Structures are given as C-alpha cells and as structure tokens.
Amino acid sequence: MSATAAPGTTPSEESPVPAPAPVLPTSTATGTASSAPAPAARRALDWRIRFGALSLIWGFSFLLIKVGTEGYAPFQVTLGRLVAGTAVLVAAIAVRRERLPRGARTWGHLTVAAFFLNALPFSLFAYAELSIPSTLAGICNATSPLWGMALSLVALSEDRPTRRRVAGLGLGFLGVLTVLGAWQGFSGLDFGGTAMALLASLSYPIGWIYVRRTLAGSGSSTLALTGSQLFLGTVQLAVVTPLFTSAPDGFPLLPTLAVFALGALGTGLAVLLQYGLVEEVGPTTAQMVTYFIPVIATAAGVALLGERLSWNTPVGALVVLAGAALTQSRARSR
C-alpha cells in the first residue's frame, strides 16, 4: 500500500504496495542512488526468505489497518503509522550515515510526493476500511499498475502503449468490475469506502509520475529521500489530525499494537527489505511481490477477521492481477 517511486522509472514498473517502497533506480521508491548489486554472501538471509517476508508484511497491512481503526480514528491510525515508520528509517539513515537531501526545491518536491504517496493514500485506505472489508481494500490496491498505465500514456511521452499493455488495461478493469459485482447492480457494495480505496490506489501512480519528473538526478540516496519523504508525511498528518479528531480516551492494546506494527514493519522495515532486494536481485524480480499482496490480504481477512468471500472476489482479483501483469510487460528486444 504504498509507495515511493524512483526517478527514472515508469509508473507501470512500480510496485503498488501498502507502504512506501524504497528502491533504487528503475524500481519503486523516491531516490536516485545507483549502487551495484550487493554480493549474496553479504546477506544474512537468502533473498527468497526476505521476499516472502515482504509479501507477508504488505499483505497483512490491510488487516492491521482494519484492527487499528477499531480503536482509533483513521487519521490517528495514519499518523501513528507514519511516526513508527519514520523512526525506523531515521535509525537506518543514522546507522548508515546517509546525508539528507539538500536544497529547498528538493524538499518542496518531497513534500508533494509525501502527500500523494503517503499522507493521502494511507488516510484514504484507513477511512475506506471503516465501511469495506480489508480483503476488498487489498484488491483495490492491486489496481495501481492499471491507473499507472493509463496515466503514463498521458503524462509520459516516452512510455508508448503496446497492444499487450492496452489489453492488460482493459482486462484489469474488467477484473475490477467482477470484484465489485457489476452484473448484479453492485448490490451490497459500499460506494463511499470502495471509491476511497480506488482513489488511494490512483494516488500512488500520480505520486510516481511527479517524482519521476521532479526528483531525477537529485544526488541523494534512495534511503535518504524515502526517509525524508516519510518525515514530511508525518508532519502533514500531525497538522491535520488534531483539526479533525479528538484525543483518544485510551490506548487499547490490540489496535495500538496493530498501528505500531503497521508503521514499524509495513512502512519501515518493508522499505529496508525491498531496498535490499532491489540491490541484490533487481527491480523486476523485487516488484513481483505486488502479485502476492492481494492474495495474502484476502486470506488474512477471511481467516483472521471472518470476512465473507463470494466467488467473484477471488476470480476478479486474479483477472486484475493478470491485467496488471500485462500492463507492466515490455516487448522483447530483438
């Protein structure tokens, strides 16, 4: 559910995830670092284990949002998430002795990126899950590559459409209609919550395109840019939250733990995991985590929250993922 975007990449290459995705050039994240892949021997855990951990963390994020909103207002969930996630990245930046971005222009662009990639989508998903199941929120999140494909055709002149990618776009949105039960008049669907989840997914590629156009060549590392972006998102929520919510009466244990885990794991540790994966195995393999997120989110919602699942939800989700995969495909070089 998240995400930050690396300058120099196309939105359709991004990984629509529930948390800011770090990453080096040609992957999801705000940054321009250009490091060579790290030797596998230097990694404590095999990349497949870290890939699986990242899939689980992001897949469970929608369940954590749902649990968090049972004890806190949506803005409070988002603020707590950003505070915990920022703390993890600040610690990582300090350990690695990364230099923070310089220049008012760069910080201004990061402020806009923080709004579209963190503050806005995180808040929209939190509000959406007040009225829709976490399973539906996770599937809506998977539409980000579809929105990214559509927007890139308009905003990025170098991103030329192909028949395969256009077909993927149509197939993906057919999957969305299947998930929503269009043939039965969207019966039982909460339009407000679903619209907010889809808008949250649309916000990610808007942010990715903005980052690509404004932060390419900034000279700062991906980690420094992502940490700074999360900090600015935290500031934005710290200003907004007191205006629209009142102080909580208490700190219920389970929702508090859910918000902390959502931030520290889904928004902090996940960034570091994907950062390492992109360095080691490249962005193409690392972004495949995208296709596991809705599957895990659906399984978690049904098994742990008792959410109901009709046949059209998993079928439509598979169609969405197939369409998303096609929109990210590239013609083979001769």
Image (cartoon, rainbow, N blue to C red):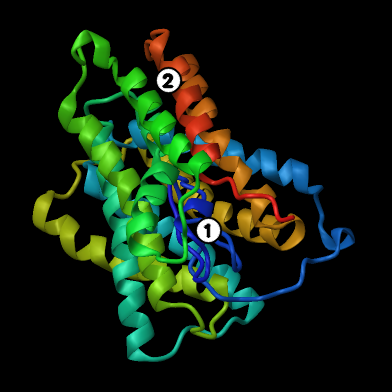
The tag earlier along the polypeptide, 1 or 2, is: 1
Q: Which class describes the residues within 10 Å of circle 1: few (<14), some (14-19), or many (20+)? A: many
| Residue 326 horizontal/vertical position (percent) | 54, 38
The mark total stands at 2
In the rendered view, would you say 117 is above or below 320? below
Question: Foreground: 156 or 236?
Answer: 156
Q: Which residue is depicted at the point 36% across and 37% down?
A: 65
> Which percent across, then down, holds residue 238?
24, 63
User: Which element is circle 1 on?
Assistant: loop
Can you give x and y, in whole percent of width and height, for residue 250 in the image? 24, 41
Q: Nearer the viewer, residue 1 or 149?
A: 149
Q: Is residue 108 left or right of residue 261?
A: left
Residue 134 against residue 202 in the figure, above or below? above
The disc labelled 2 sits on which kind of residue? Gly
Q: Quadrant location of residue 282?
A: bottom right
234 left or right of 167 in image? left
Residue 173 is marked as none
Residue holding disc 1: 28
Instruction: State the residue in front, 241 or 330.
Output: 330
On the question of residue 241 being in view, the answer is yes
Looking at the picture, tell me which residue is in the foreground, 174 or 248: 174
Q: Which mark is residue 316?
A: 2
Give the answer, above or below, for where 49 lies relative to 299. below
Examine the rendering and report whether any part of residue 254 can be seen. Answer: no
User: Where does the N terminus fall, quadrant-wise?
Assistant: top left
Q: Amino acid at mark 1?
A: Thr
Residue farthest right in this picture? 41
On screen, residue 273 versus residue 60, left or right, reads right
